Protein backbone atom coordinates (compact mmCIF):
# COMPACT_ATOMS: atom_id res chain seq x y z
CA UNK A 1 0.00 0.00 0.00
CA UNK A 2 2.79 2.41 0.93
CA UNK A 3 4.66 1.56 -2.31
CA UNK A 4 1.49 2.27 -4.31
CA UNK A 5 1.15 5.71 -2.69
CA UNK A 6 4.80 6.51 -3.38
CA UNK A 7 4.43 5.41 -7.00
CA UNK A 8 1.24 7.47 -7.38
CA UNK A 9 2.93 10.53 -5.86
CA UNK A 10 5.96 10.11 -8.14
CA UNK A 11 3.70 9.81 -11.18
CA UNK A 12 1.77 12.94 -10.17
CA UNK A 13 5.01 14.90 -9.74
CA UNK A 14 6.29 13.68 -13.12
CA UNK A 15 3.05 14.63 -14.91
CA UNK A 16 2.93 18.05 -13.24
CA UNK A 17 6.60 18.61 -14.08
CA UNK A 18 5.98 17.69 -17.73
CA UNK A 19 2.97 20.02 -17.91
CA UNK A 20 4.99 22.84 -16.34
CA UNK A 21 7.89 22.24 -18.75
CA UNK A 22 5.51 22.31 -21.73
CA UNK A 23 3.90 25.53 -20.47
CA UNK A 24 7.33 27.15 -20.17
CA UNK A 25 8.47 26.39 -23.73
CA UNK A 26 9.85 29.55 -25.35
CA UNK A 27 7.18 31.27 -27.41
CA UNK A 28 7.18 33.19 -30.65
CA UNK A 29 4.52 35.83 -31.17
CA UNK A 30 3.67 37.46 -34.49
CA UNK A 31 1.81 40.77 -34.86
CA UNK A 32 0.95 41.99 -38.34
CA UNK A 33 1.62 45.74 -38.53
CA UNK A 34 0.64 46.53 -42.13
CA UNK A 35 -0.38 44.78 -45.35
CA UNK A 36 -0.60 46.75 -48.59
CA UNK A 37 -0.61 46.07 -52.34
CA UNK A 38 2.52 47.11 -54.22
CA UNK A 39 2.52 48.91 -57.59
CA UNK A 40 3.54 45.64 -59.25
CA UNK A 41 0.38 43.59 -59.87
CA UNK A 42 0.19 40.44 -57.74
CA UNK A 43 2.71 41.68 -55.16
CA UNK A 44 2.20 43.00 -51.64
CA UNK A 45 4.19 44.34 -48.71
CA UNK A 46 3.59 42.82 -45.29
CA UNK A 47 5.24 44.05 -42.13
CA UNK A 48 5.23 41.85 -39.03
CA UNK A 49 6.68 42.25 -35.54
CA UNK A 50 8.07 38.91 -34.39
CA UNK A 51 8.74 38.46 -30.66
CA UNK A 52 10.99 35.59 -29.53
CA UNK A 53 10.94 34.41 -25.92
CA UNK A 54 14.31 33.45 -24.38
CA UNK A 55 15.67 30.45 -26.30
CA UNK A 56 12.83 30.46 -28.83
CA UNK A 57 13.54 29.41 -32.39
CA UNK A 58 11.72 29.20 -35.71
CA UNK A 59 12.98 26.32 -37.86
CA UNK A 60 13.95 26.27 -41.52
CA UNK A 61 11.41 28.01 -43.74
CA UNK A 62 11.07 30.14 -46.88
CA UNK A 63 8.93 33.05 -48.08
CA UNK A 64 7.36 33.71 -51.51
CA UNK A 65 9.42 36.88 -51.88
CA UNK A 66 12.11 38.96 -50.21
CA UNK A 67 12.36 39.65 -46.47
CA UNK A 68 14.15 42.46 -44.66
CA UNK A 69 14.66 41.67 -40.97
CA UNK A 70 15.43 44.53 -38.57
CA UNK A 71 16.26 43.56 -34.99
CA UNK A 72 14.39 45.78 -32.54
CA UNK A 73 15.77 44.26 -29.32
CA UNK A 74 17.87 41.36 -28.12
CA UNK A 75 20.13 39.09 -30.14
CA UNK A 76 18.96 36.85 -32.97
CA UNK A 77 20.89 34.25 -34.93
CA UNK A 78 19.90 33.51 -38.52
CA UNK A 79 20.94 30.26 -40.17
CA UNK A 80 20.92 29.76 -43.94
CA UNK A 81 21.32 26.37 -45.61
CA UNK A 82 24.99 25.67 -46.28
CA UNK A 83 26.25 28.92 -44.71
CA UNK A 84 27.63 29.92 -41.30
CA UNK A 85 25.12 31.55 -38.92
CA UNK A 86 24.71 35.33 -38.82
CA UNK A 87 24.17 36.98 -35.43
CA UNK A 88 22.37 40.34 -35.25
CA UNK A 89 21.77 42.67 -32.32
CA UNK A 90 19.30 45.52 -31.86
CA UNK A 91 19.70 48.00 -34.71
CA UNK A 92 21.12 45.45 -37.19
CA UNK A 93 19.30 44.35 -40.33
CA UNK A 94 19.48 41.53 -42.84
CA UNK A 95 18.22 41.02 -46.40
CA UNK A 96 16.86 37.54 -47.13
CA UNK A 97 16.42 36.69 -50.83
CA UNK A 98 13.18 35.18 -52.13
CA UNK A 99 12.99 31.45 -51.53
CA UNK A 100 16.15 31.32 -49.36
CA UNK A 101 15.68 28.67 -46.67
CA UNK A 102 16.55 30.09 -43.26
CA UNK A 103 15.93 29.71 -39.53
CA UNK A 104 16.03 32.20 -36.68
CA UNK A 105 16.56 31.84 -32.95
CA UNK A 106 16.95 34.00 -29.90
CA UNK A 107 20.49 33.48 -28.62
CA UNK A 108 20.33 36.18 -25.96
CA UNK A 109 19.32 35.82 -22.32
CA UNK A 110 16.11 37.86 -22.59
CA UNK A 111 13.36 38.58 -25.09
CA UNK A 112 14.25 39.42 -28.70
CA UNK A 113 12.13 41.10 -31.38
CA UNK A 114 12.42 41.83 -35.07
CA UNK A 115 10.45 43.85 -37.55
CA UNK A 116 10.13 41.67 -40.66
CA UNK A 117 9.19 43.37 -43.92
CA UNK A 118 8.12 41.01 -46.69
CA UNK A 119 7.78 41.92 -50.38
CA UNK A 120 5.90 38.86 -51.56
CA UNK A 121 3.57 37.30 -54.11
CA UNK A 122 0.03 38.09 -53.06
CA UNK A 123 -2.22 35.19 -52.09
CA UNK A 124 0.57 32.71 -51.34
CA UNK A 125 1.30 31.45 -47.81
CA UNK A 126 3.71 33.87 -46.14
CA UNK A 127 5.74 31.11 -44.48
CA UNK A 128 6.53 27.71 -45.98
CA UNK A 129 8.09 25.38 -43.39
CA UNK A 130 10.87 23.13 -44.73
Image (cartoon, rainbow, N blue to C red):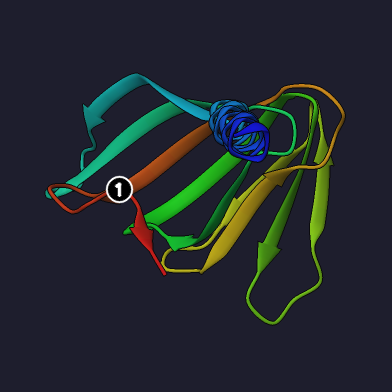
The answer to which image quadrant residue 25 occupies is top right
- Residue that sits furthest to the front in the current view: 1
- The answer to whether 87 appears left or right of 78 in the picture is right
Decide: few, some or many residues near mark 1? Use Cα within 10 Å; few <14, some 14-19, many ≥20: some
Residue for point 69% across, 46% down: 105
- The answer to whether 111 appears left or right of 27 in the picture is right
Residue for point 67% across, 32% down: 2
- The image quadrant where one finds the C terminus is bottom left
Q: Which residue is mark 1?
A: 126
**In this rendering, is residue 41 above or below 116?**
below
Judged from the image, the secondary structure of the residue bearing numbered disc 1 is loop
Q: Position of residue 79 (x, y in %)?
A: 69, 63
- Residue that sits furthest to the bottom in the current view: 82
Residue for point 50% across, 69% down: 100
**In this rendering, is residue 3 above or below 72?**
below
- The answer to whether 91 appears left or right of 78 in the picture is right
Q: Position of residue 18 (x, y in %)?
A: 59, 37
- The image quadrant where one finds the N terminus is top right
Residue for point 23% across, 27% down: 36
Amino acid sequence: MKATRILAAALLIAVNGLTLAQAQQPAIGRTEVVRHDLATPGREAIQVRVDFGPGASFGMHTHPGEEIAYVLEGTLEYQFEGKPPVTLKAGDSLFIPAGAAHAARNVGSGKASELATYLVDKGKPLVVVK
